[in-house]
Image (cartoon, helix red, strand yellow):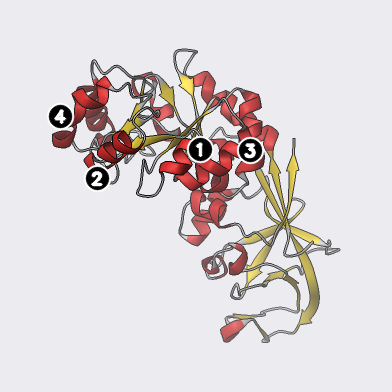
């Protein structure tokens, strides 16, 4: 089993896409963000499952990801590149039929010069100050961009996971002002924005984390399960310590299991320091004790009548966001960090 078994539920991911698609009530398209290898779960398997569910618009971070995705999807679906047309991307954009979302005057000039007849979209900065054309640059380029037929105009919300944050309404107003009358479909909402309501939907929503079972989409079907193999068990006497730094001491005669996974496999070292992290044997919680090391972690299994061959880190009792909270991070980081030493299984 190597360092563990990671099961990716493609049917759950497709179900999440369909549920988010239904939020639009048929009034807009629903894309799918599959950047970072589908948030670490394998875009070559995840994207075709989403295409079968009905997705026709896909989003990646950079052109190299888009080229790999085109091989998995074949011709037909649109593949948008958030980073736009960077220096050296022309061949990949042309050969893989990608749609760069142009972010700057330099990218607009580069794309129109190198690929004058190729499809493109535009990304606008409505207040996040990360990617996109700023309002002053946009005013000078809007007629040129509009005249060349952009396939999509997008922006990105900075605080969509906080529904009452004032930035959401402010960015909505700015997006409307910047795009009103533009001869292109518009998209403002990722998962969090899609949940804010139809005023944020425009012509396309583009969910990402919600597809994979993460917040802020609280109704998402969990999409991953992580089982870790037990390498060894031992009895630990009262007062004995376990792991690096003698960080945990037994206050009762204890049975300790060592599992074959650690921070090299994407399990943050911080979960061993939280004092609350657990793995599960069925519905029974077993505390993680001591420090998480590179390839191993240790678990108190004293209260189990029988220790199974594997214990579960991600399951119905502990999802990606619960584990992230213990590590002081977010579900996105947990998903994208899950190591490639795990034996991966895909459930259709």
The disc at residue 129 is: 2
| Mark 4 Cα-neighbour bin, 10 Å: few <14, some 14–19, many ≥20 | few
| Mark 1 Cα-neighbour bin, 10 Å: few <14, some 14–19, many ≥20 | few
The C terminus - image quarter: top right
The N terminus - image quarter: bottom right
Q: Residue at image x 30%, y 33%?
A: 112
**Does residue 235 sit above or below 45 in this rendering?**
below
Q: Residue at image x 65%, y 59%?
A: 340
Numbered disc 1: secondary structure:
helix
Q: Name the residue under label 1.
A: 95
Q: How far apart are marks 2 and 4 (CA)?
A: 17 Å
Residue 221 visible, this angle:
no
Numbered disc 2: secondary structure:
loop
Numbered disc 3: secondary structure:
helix
Q: Distance between the residues labelled 2 and 1?
A: 31 Å
The disc at residue 72 is: 3
Q: How far apart are marks 4 and 1 (CA)?
A: 31 Å
Q: Distance between the residues labelled 2 and 3?
A: 33 Å
Q: Quadrant of residue 312?
A: bottom right
Where does residue 198 sit, x and y in percent of width and height? 38, 19
| Mark 2 Cα-neighbour bin, 10 Å: few <14, some 14–19, many ≥20 | few
The disc at residue 139 is: 4
Q: Is residue 15 left or right of 208 when viewed as pictured?
A: right
Nearer to me, 89 or 318: 89
- Nearer the camera: disc 2 or disc 4: 4
Numbered disc 4: secondary structure:
helix
**Does residue 20 sit above or below 261 in this rendering?**
above
Where does residue 343 sit, x and y in percent of width and height? 74, 56
Q: Is residue 234 left or right of 77 when viewed as pictured?
A: right
């Amino acid at each position: 089993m190597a360092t563990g078994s990671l099961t990716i539920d493609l049917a759950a991911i497709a179900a999440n896409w369909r549920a988010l698609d239904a939020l639009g009530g048929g009034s807009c398209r629903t894309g799918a963000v599959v950047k970072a290898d589908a948030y670490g779960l394998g875009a070559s398997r995840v994207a075709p499952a989403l295409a079968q569910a009905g997705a026709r618009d896909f989003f990646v971070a950079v052109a190299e990801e888009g080229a790999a995705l085109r091989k998995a999807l074949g011709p037909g679906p649109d593949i948008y590149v958030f980073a736009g047309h960077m220096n050296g991307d022309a061949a990949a954009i042309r050969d893989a039929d990608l749609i760069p979302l142009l972010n700057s005057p330099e990218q607009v000039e580069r794309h129109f010069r190198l690929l004058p007849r190729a499809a493109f979209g535009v990304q606008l900065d409505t207040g996040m100050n990360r990617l996109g054309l700023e309002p002053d640059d946009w005013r000078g380029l809007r007629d040129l961009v509009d005249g060349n037929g952009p396939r999509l105009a997008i922006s990105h919300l900075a605080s969509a996971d906080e529904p009452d944050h004032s930035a959401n309404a402010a960015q909505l107003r700015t997006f409307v002002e910047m795009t009103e009358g533009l001869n292109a479909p518009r998209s403002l909402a990722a998962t969090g924005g899609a949940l804010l309501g139809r005023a944020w939907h425009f012509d396309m929503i583009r969910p990402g984390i919600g597809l994979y079972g993460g917040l802020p989409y609280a109704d998402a079907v969990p999409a991953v399960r992580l089982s870790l193999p037990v390498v060894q068990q031992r009895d630990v006497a009262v007062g004995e310590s376990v792991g690096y730094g003698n960080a945990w001491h037994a206050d009762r005669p204890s049975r300790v299991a060592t599992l074959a996974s650690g921070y090299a496999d994407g399990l943050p070292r911080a979960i061993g320091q939280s004092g609350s992290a657990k793995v599960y044997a069925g519905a029974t919680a077993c505390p993680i004790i001591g420090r998480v090391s590179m390839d191993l972690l240790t678990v108190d299994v004293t209260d189990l009548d029988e220790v199974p061959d594997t214990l579960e880190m991600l399951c119905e009792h502990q999802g990606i966001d619960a584990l992230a909270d213990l590590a002081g991070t977010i579900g996105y980081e947990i998903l994208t960090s899950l190591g490639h030493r795990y034996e991966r299984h895909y459930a259709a």
